[in-house]
Image (cartoon, rainbow, N blue to C red):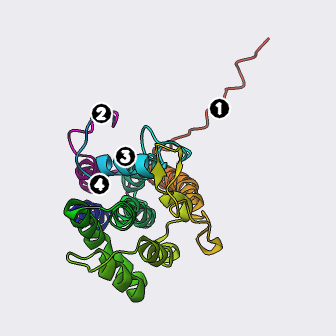
């Protein structure tokens, strides 16, 4: 999970080097962006994502099986996670934005990517909080929960210091006790600030009964209604129109330059009067 910040760093490096409204001079930013995607995915995920990946891509697919957030509709226990479906749409969008010089749009896309990347870390913390509290988890579960919590706590603290303290007290190494209910409530208090929703996090699924674990079903707090997916769609649609606008402006400037050079793109040809057409 320590690669998380390096992925974001690559995306920000791409945006720093982006040249606004320049269609042919953003190869280096695109290369940096592609490196970010590579670090997110890893080499073991396979060309179609079906391999045994060990990095963030693989983690997202593991956690979706636990929280029943796999599939394009986030309602399955098998297959690619909704997180990865959304992220790869945004990865492709960001690459296109950089290619056409839509640097501001790429920044907005990067921000949304970062929000979604936190989802598996939250799911992981919740999973091990439940195991320790309700399923008599051992030192192994306590350690894994502490690692997941450590990865997400700085972002939680930025949104809500009290919530971060609650999660830390319950998940830290050597915690005297762990309350899944308290950890879950603390996370939910930050969802709006984090840009994620109850539906995106899902609930902890129990295969044996075909239901969610007791007290671990998806939350339905009105303050955390599923606006995040619509935000992703809005970014994509808005960026498409912005990209078309950039291309249109580029075409007009190109034609204007040809006009000044005396080489207009479109020339009017006249037909001499002597050539009658029967």
Looking at the image, which is closer to me, 107 or 78? 78
Question: Left or right: 22 with respect to 13?
Answer: right
Q: Marks 2 and 4, Cα distance to the nearest angstrom?
A: 18 Å
Which dot, 2 or 4, sits closer to the camera? Answer: 2
Mark 3 or mark 2: name the one nearer the start of the chain: 2
Identify the mark at residue 61; answer none if there is no mark.
3
Identify the mark at residue 47; answer none if there is no mark.
2
SS under mark 1 = loop
Which dot, 4 or 3, sits closer to the camera? Answer: 3
SS under mark 3 = helix
List x then y, in percent, for residue 4.
26, 62
Span shown in magenta: 21-49
Q: Marks 1 and 3, Cα distance to the nearest angstrom?
A: 65 Å
Regarding residue 267, the answer to whether it shows in the image is yes
Residue in view at x 53 percent, y 74 percent? 192
Identify the mark at residue 33; answer none if there is no mark.
4
Q: Marks 1 and 2, Cα distance to the nearest angstrom?
A: 56 Å
SS under mark 2 = loop
Placement of the C terminus among the 4 image quadrants: top right
Which dot, 3 or 2, sits closer to the camera? Answer: 3
């Amino acid at each position: 999970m320590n690669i998380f910040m390096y992925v974001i760093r690559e995306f920000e490096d791409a945006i720093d080097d982006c040249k606004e409204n320049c269609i042919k001079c953003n190869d280096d930013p695109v290369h940096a962006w592609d490196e970010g995607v590579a670090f997110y995915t890893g080499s073991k995920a396979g060309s179609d994502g079906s391999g045994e990946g060990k990095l963030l891509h693989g983690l997202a697919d593991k956690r979706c099986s636990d929280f029943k957030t796999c599939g394009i509709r986030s309602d399955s226990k098998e297959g690619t996670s909704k997180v990865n479906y959304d992220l790869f749409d945004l990865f492709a969008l960001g690459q296109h934005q950089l290619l056409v010089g839509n640097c501001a749009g790429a920044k907005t896309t990067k921000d949304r990517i970062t929000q979604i990347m936190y989802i598996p870390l939250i799911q992981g913390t919740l999973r091990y909080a439940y195991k320790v509290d309700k399923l008599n988890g051992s030192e192994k579960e306590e350690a894994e929960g502490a690692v997941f919590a450590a990865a997400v706590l700085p972002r939680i603290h930025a949104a809500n210091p009290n919530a971060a303290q609650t999660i830390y007290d319950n998940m830290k190494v050597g915690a005297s006790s762990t309350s899944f209910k308290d950890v879950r409530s603390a996370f939910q208090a930050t969802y709006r600030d984090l840009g994620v929703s109850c539906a995106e996090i899902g609930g902890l699924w129990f295969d044996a009964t075909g239901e969610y674990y007791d007290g671990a079903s998806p939350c339905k707090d009105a303050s955390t209604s599923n606006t995040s997916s619509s935000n992703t769609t809005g970014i994509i649609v808005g960026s498409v129109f912005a990209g078309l606008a950039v291309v249109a402006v580029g075409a007009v400037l190109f034609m204007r330059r040809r006009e000044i050079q005396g080489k207009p793109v479109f020339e009017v040809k006249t037909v001499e009067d002597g050539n009658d057409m029967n």
